[in-house]
Amino acid sequence: MSDFKLDVEECLALQELPSYEFISSLVQKVCYTLANEDESYRPLNCVGQPGSLLKLYEEDARCLPVVIVPDIHSRPDFIQNILNCTLPKLKLTVKQALEQKKIDLVCVGDAVHTELSSLRWKLISAEFDGGIHTGHYMQDEMIATLSTLCALMTLKIRYPENFHFLKGNHENILNSSLGGDYAFYKYADEGEMVKRFIVEYYDEKLLNLISQYENLLPLIAYGKNYVVSHAEPAEAFTTEQLIDARFEDSVVEGLIWTRNGQVKKSTVVPIMNELLGKKAAKKALYFSGHRPVKESYALRQDGKLVQIHNPHKQNIVLVEPDSNFDFEKDIINTKGAKKNA
């Protein structure tokens, strides 16, 4: 089977590392897609490029249900379960709904770095301590990582107007501490380990190409009755700041790195007021991932912010444009949801 003929499902089923030629070609294609997004849903920034804000609603025009996906963290099986999951009100799978342009799908970010296997990272650390940067355990991690990345990029290329992936704090392949990013370390020195693997197994050109992709990603999205970003917003950013976020490090940091308890005043209501209007904002919710929750969700900021990232679950959120959000029915377990044949 030729690498260049891989589709989304084949990307998700990878059992070995994909070729350099395939990844390089795919990243170049998705960069072209992101750099040429329609300003009708991705307003241009101050230098005439697609900005960091996605506008997924237009009164009397574009108004679709949205599926919001929490942090993925190298879980290709999660993506497969999402695509196969049937949305009850539409009676279509997510994949069918994307093909028919009947939904928007917004991922909150964090495609990479396995969270569910601290043991793997300990074993990788042992490999690295021995000077082995592309060893067995690291290759296992990178197969899951690149499977996930390739699938997400393919989805963006295939459904550019309806599939969107926001930048999270783990979208930092250079392991940089510039531009609102910070070098990442959790179970081990994951950020540096992934960087070294890419350079040694592939090359530095591919590393920089993936970084270009990350820097083209939007940071925040909104529709008729929702706003979503990777993390709880640290400040009440203006529309102009959100569109031009890449030129203000504090905005990038404030949308991807915020800790629980860091924000001492309401930030989501002012942002929703500005983006949606005060009347619509009263019925709207702000969704984020980033910080893990113990159940299916956690509420902050007087119940207006909904955190949805539980690494032990495979939940998605469905927000209908003309319905009140139902916390029992509209948070869907993709492992247990009905599948269409």
Image (spheres, rainbow, N blue to C red):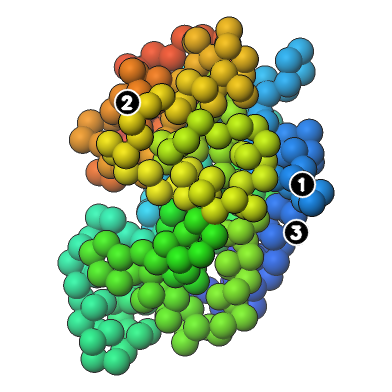
Residue 109 picture location, percent across and down = 47, 48
Local SS, label 1: loop
Judge whether 219 appears above or below 306 on screen. Answer: below
Most foreground residue, 159 or 269: 269
Residue 289 picture location, percent across and down = 39, 39
The answer to whether any part of residue 184 appears in the image is yes
Q: CA distance from mark 2 to mark 3?
A: 37 Å
Q: Which residue is mark 2?
A: 300
| Image side of residue 211 versus residue 188, left or right | right
Which amino acid type is shown beneath numbered disc 2?
A: Arg
Which amino acid type is shown beneath numbered disc 3?
A: Tyr
Residue 236 picture location, percent across and down = 51, 31
State which quadrant residue 241 falls in. Answer: top right
Residue 178 picture location, percent across and down = 51, 64
Q: Which residue is mark 1?
A: 46
Local SS, label 3: helix
Most foreground residue, 251 or 227: 251
Q: Residue at 23% across / 31% down in the picture? A: 295
Q: Residue furthest front?
A: 264
Q: Which residue is mark 3?
A: 32
Q: Are marks 2 and 1 in contact (CB under 8 Å)?
A: no
Q: Quadrant of the N terminus?
A: bottom right
Circle 2 crowding by C-alpha within 10 Å: few under 14, some 14–19, many from 20? some
Most foreground residue, 65 or 275: 275
Q: Residue at 68% across / 70% down in the picture? A: 25
Q: Residue at 35% across / 23% down in the picture? A: 301
Which amino acid type is shown beneath numbered disc 1?
A: Cys
Q: CA distance from mark 2 to mark 1?
A: 33 Å
User: Could you tell which of marks 2 and 1 lies nearer the N-terminus?
Assistant: 1
Q: CA distance from mark 3 to mark 1?
A: 19 Å
